[in-house]
Image: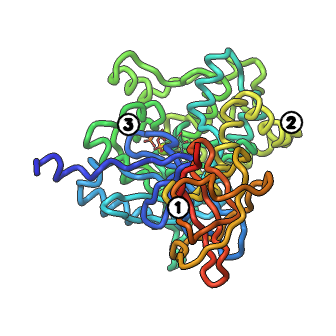
Amino acid sequence: MSNSSLRKPPKLQPGSPKDPVRFGHYYLLGLIARGGMAEVYRARLVQSPADGSEPRLLAIKVMRPELAKEARFVDMFHREGQLALMLKDNAIVETVELGNIDGRHFIAMEYIGGRDLTQILRRCQKSSLRIPVPHAVHVGVGIAKGLDFAHNLVGPDGRRLSLVNRDVSPSNVRIAYSGDVKLLDFGIAQALMKFTSEIGILKGKFSYMSPEQIRGMPVDQRTDIFSAGIIIHEMLTTEKLFRGDTEFALMERVRKADVDPPSKYNRRVSPELDRIVMKALARDVAERYANSAEMHADLKAVLDGYRFDVRELRDFMRKEFRREYTKDLQDSESARVSVPAGERLPTFDNTIEAVTAVTKNTAPIPGAPLPPPVAPSLGEGTDSQIAGLPDDMQIENSGSDAGTNNIAGQVLDEEKSGFWSRMFKKRK
Ligand SMILES: Nc1ncnc2c1ncn2[C@@H]1O[C@H](COP(=O)(O)OP(=O)(O)OP(=O)(O)O)[C@@H](O)[C@H]1O
Ligand SMILES: [Mg+2]
């Protein structure tokens, strides 16, 4: 065996909404996206809910094997991931499990059907579209609410944990097709940022850092407030706030934090909203919002002035991402009920006549599930239609597997009733 095959775990089969692939106690139902440090899959638990309710869709973020090779990373990931499990707030994506399956470290979360802000901003730029100001403020309120919850999280001993995200960026803010706002990657960001900076894939992150963070100075929760300020500024202007031709130039811009108020680019931004954004973006931490609760309260007051209804953002999302939304609905529906190909019962169509039959001496497939409702019978046929059917056996409730001409049927024998599938070919 070569060294590289020793090092690399086999590639994960991503599955698809209609073709689940087993991953430990989960089914993977297709790749959602490939991020810098991980791949994110749609998933659901193999075990269906005991109460018969619809299975919940999940998103599983599997760390890249390069990161998993680092024992220190794995250690930090699991330690910090424990914090993510404690973050139960409706503005933060819910983490349901942190684990390791066959050497793959993952985090399982609730699935949020929607788009992240990077995708939304890109679409707006492409279509010369503006995010309406009240929508942007609503998203800002959501971000501040999630931050406030996480920043004030207390541990089991009742002491504040002083959690800092460090990676509040548009790709980590997800807007659901319902209009809900969810922060992603909270809790694991520190481990991810540390190690991705070591392996040099921090690309794209500098644009959302605070001046103190980019200088490598100690940071506190106000670094997240600065990053939230950048995101709100960008939603209001549909422009990137910090850019640079080179990485160095970009970092210089962030260090200086010389920012114009958003109203300079968008006349609809009120002086009060300008003030809030500029306070979040103060270069000097002492001039910034001291905590996210204050920022949340100010944004909320502005939002209340608009009499904004979340259905407006819902409609905006569903309209601007109509194709993606429709596909997400279809995929989610399939993903809730699909079973792996090997366990699937044939689908029926009406192209052949059903045969009525009785069997003798023939055992049904052990453990085979009972048949699903069968396509309406088109009248009785005879077993002569079926090539290879033993003389002593007949089947009923048969149907043909669409496209393959295979026949499935139910054995009639009372003691041994069961389900046969794909055993016989229809005679031409
Ligand atoms: N719980 C979730 N439900 C639905 N989509 C999700 C979920 N978590 C992440 N995603 C989406 O998966 C994509 C990849 O996320 P990921 O965090 O791996 O990369 P990223 O945020 O683009 O970059 P980074 O590696 O810097 O975090 C993003 O579009 C993100 O919105
Ligand atoms: Mg992310």
**Left or right: 69 in relation to 409:** left
Kindly indicate whether the residue at mark 3 contacts the one at mark 1 (C-beta within 8 angstroms). no
Q: Position of residue 44 (x, y in %)?
A: 56, 59
Question: Is residue 148 something that shows in the picture?
Answer: no
Residue located 61% across and 59% down the image: 408
Q: Residue at 56% across / 44% down in the picture?
A: 404
- For disc 1, the marked residue is 343
What amino acid type should be assigned to the residue bearing mark 1? Glu
Q: Position of residue 115 (x, y in %)?
A: 62, 38
Task: Decide: is 125 above or below 313.
Answer: above
Determine crowd level at label 2: few under 14, some 14-19, many 20+ residues with C-alpha closer than 10 A: few
Which residue is more in the foreground, 86 or 110?
110
Upstream in sequence: badge 2 or badge 1: 2
User: Which SS class for mark 3?
Assistant: helix
Q: Position of residue 382 (x, y in %)?
A: 69, 57
Q: Is residue 88 something one can see in this rendering?
A: yes
Query: What's under tag 2, amino acid-wise?
Result: Tyr
Q: CA distance from mark 2 to mark 3?
A: 36 Å
Residue furthest to the bottom? 415
Q: Nearer the viewer, mark 1 or mark 3?
A: 1
> Residue tagged by mark 2?
306
> N-terminal of the two: label 2 or label 3?
3
Tell me, what colour scheme is on the image?
rainbow
* The furthest residue to the right: 307
- For the point 72% across and 51% down, the residue is 353
Please state which of residues 73 and 110 is positioned toward the viewer in this rendering. 110
Q: Which residue is mark 3?
A: 214
Mark 2 secondary-structure assignment: helix
Q: CA distance from mark 1 to mark 3?
A: 52 Å
Q: Is residue 77 left or right of residue 402?
A: left
